[in-house]
Amino acid sequence: MAKYSKALWPFIEQVCERDQISIKGKSIEKDMVEAELICSEDRSMEVLEDAMCEEQRDTTVSKIPVYSYNTLKNKEKLHRLMKLNGKRGFHVLKQDYEKCKKECLI
């Protein structure tokens, strides 16, 4: 079981639904949600990163997709998400912007 921010939780659920990842044992505390994502630890970290992208996307008027450094490096995932979102344009997760710029991903 891991604890997640209550504010980020809807985006975690959205990513889990999109990627067909099961959630087990969800319990809600004050500002946290405790749950187990039925996947590897590495995949759980990826879900969290994707959820932060969805949260950032939700703050924009245009709803242009937001991708992380790791997604931009993973061409297979990037193309899958571009097809799913129906858009080739994107924004970069704010915390990854400099890293992406340095590696010429943007």
Image (cartoon, rainbow, N blue to C red):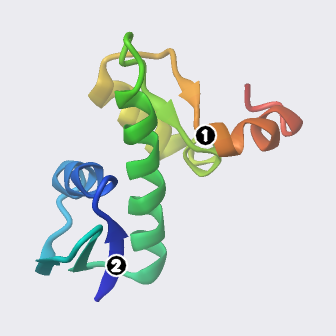
Left or right of 20: which side holds 52? right
Comparing 104 with 62, the one in front is 62
Upstream in sequence: badge 1 or badge 2: 2
State whether residue 22 appears in this view: yes
The C terminus lies in which quarter of the figure? top right
Horizontal arrangement in the rendering, residue 32 relative to residue 20 (left or right): right
Q: Is residue 61 above or below residue 80?
A: above
Instruction: Using the numbered discs, state the Cα–Cα distance from disc 1 to disc 2 in whole angstroms.
Output: 27 Å
Residue of label 1: 72
Regarding residue 37, the answer to whether it shows in the image is no
Q: Residue at x 40, y 26 (%)?
A: 59
For disc 1, the neighbor class at 10 Å (few under 14, some 14 to 19, many from 20) is some
Residue contact at pointers 1 and 2, CB within 8 angstroms: no
- Image point (42%, 61%), residue name: 48
Quarter of the rendering occupied by the N terminus? bottom left
Instruction: Between label 1 and label 2, give the one nearer the viewer.
Output: 2
Residue found at x 83% / y 31%: 104
Closer to the camera in the image, 67 or 79: 67
Q: Is residue 17 above or below residue 66?
A: below
* Dot 1 amino acid type: Leu
Q: Secondary structure at mark 2?
A: strand
Residue at 57% from the left image edge and 48% from the top image edge: 74
Q: Which residue is mark 2?
A: 3
Q: Circle 1 — which element? A: helix
Position in image of residue 45 (x %, y %) = 47, 69
Give the label on residue 5, or none: none
Q: Position of residue 85 (x, y in %)?
A: 31, 25
